């Protein structure tokens, strides 16, 4: 049996109303390719009963509750059969034309992976940020340092590693490891996009101190043994150090910004950034948060 071209991994926790929309967004962009969507329940719900019967949908065993997105994604990854894999949060969606996935896979065949741009949207659907900006053709660790937003790859299966046991940045580490395995630079999809939907109560709607602690742990592990990044370990550490700095600047390292404020503040900072230096120690004026 020929394996699917792409496995889309979805961890589901209390997403009864939103998961069907995420699944539909994938199937609507799968023209010309074979996809499977692997749903890993993490709240005891049998999501198969909430979704239309479709042979392209697969489900991990129901049972674990609140094990964390990393654990649920690993359960999905364990049964995925696609030649390529991609993460999709159950409250997000894909955007693009009906053959958007096929176009992205054409680019992934060049070096094993392709970056899917992220469009951050507020609860009303308005665009808050787009990363990278339209027109970008290649994306590597240097550009990733300035992204300050989850970015996902469609990556060849043999280039990905299991998800590290983080509650908040497991996806960041997963995709950066895949970037490293692909050589550190990948093409950018020009048709497919990832809709990062801001929603009150989502996992990333949390205090900055929790992110800070996870960045610190990841950096310590990179310093200890490379943490699966191989020759790209120093580049990965530069990304995480800078992201940790921005988290501290916007969230104060401990506070909880209002929904969407992080991305608005980052956009304001980047628009005023000059050169390639690190964020200044006292960034409130350049971040537009001083008032």
Image: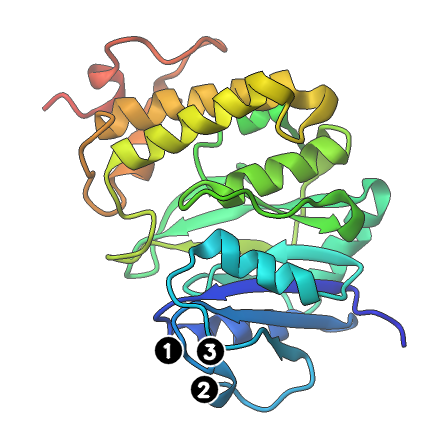
Residue wearing tag 2: 50
Assess disc 1: are there few (<14), some (14-19) or many (≥20) residues with their C-alpha within 10 Å of its C-alpha: some
Q: Is residue 34 above or below residue 93?
A: below
Q: Tell me which numbered mark, 2 or 3, is placed earlier along the sequence.
A: 3
Q: Residue at x 58, y 26 (%)?
A: 143
Query: Label 3 to label 1, Cα distance in Å?
Result: 8 Å
Instruction: Say what secondary structure mark 1 lies in.
Output: loop
Residue wearing tag 1: 16
Foreground: disc 2 or disc 3: 2
State left or right for residue 62 relative to residue 43: right
Residue wearing tag 3: 20
State left or right for residue 186 relative to residue 281: right
Instruction: Say what secondary structure mark 2 lies in.
Output: helix
Q: Residue at x 23, y 47 (%)?
A: 259
The spot of residue 62 in percent (x, y) is 50, 77
State left or right for residue 269 relative to residue 111: left
Q: Is residue 147 above or below residue 15?
A: above
State left or right for residue 256 relative to residue 124: left
Contact between marks 1 and 2 (CB within 8 A): the answer is: yes
The spot of residue 83 in percent (x, y) is 80, 59
Assess disc 3: are there few (<14), some (14-19) or many (≥20) residues with their C-alpha within 10 Å of its C-alpha: some
Q: Residue at x 73, y 20 (%)?
A: 231
Contact between marks 2 and 3 (CB within 8 A): the answer is: yes
Q: Tell me which numbered mark, 1 or 2, is placed earlier along the sequence.
A: 1
């Amino acid at each position: 049996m020929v394996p699917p071209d792409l496995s889309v991994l979805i961890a589901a926790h209390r997403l009864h109303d939103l998961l069907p929309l995420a699944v539909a967004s994938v199937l609507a962009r799968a023209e010309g390719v074979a996809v499977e969507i692997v749903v890993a329940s993490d709240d005891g719900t049998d999501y198969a009963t909430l979704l239309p019967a479709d042979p392209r949908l697969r489900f991990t065993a129901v049972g674990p509750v609140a094990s964390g997105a990393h654990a649920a994604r690993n359960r999905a990854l364990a049964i995925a059969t696609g030649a390529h894999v991609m993460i999709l949060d159950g409250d997000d969606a894909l955007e693009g034309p009906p053959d958007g996935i096929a176009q992205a896979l054409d680019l992934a065949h060049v070096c094993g992976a392709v970056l899917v741009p992220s469009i951050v949207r507020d609860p009303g659907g308005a665009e808050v940020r787009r990363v990278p900006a339209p027109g970008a053709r290649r994306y590597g660790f240097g550009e990733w340092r300035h992204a300050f937003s989850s970015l996902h790859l469609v990556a060849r299966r043999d280039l990905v590693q299991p998800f590290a046991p983080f509650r908040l940045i497991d996806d960041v580490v997963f995709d950066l490891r895949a970037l490293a395995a692909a050589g550190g630079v990948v093409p950018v999809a020009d048709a497919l996009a990832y809709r990062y939907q801001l929603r009150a109560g989502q996992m990333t709607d949390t205090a900055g101190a929790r992110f800070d602690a996870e960045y610190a742990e990841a950096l310590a592990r990179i310093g200890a043994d490379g943490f699966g990044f191989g020759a790209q370990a120093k580049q990965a550490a530069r990304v995480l150090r800078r992201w940790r700095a921005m988290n501290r600047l916007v969230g104060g390292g401990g506070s909880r910004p209002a929904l969407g404020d992080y991305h608005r503040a980052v956009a304001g900072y980047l628009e005023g950034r000059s050169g390639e230096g690190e964020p200044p120690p006292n960034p409130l004026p350049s971040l537009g948060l001083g008032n």
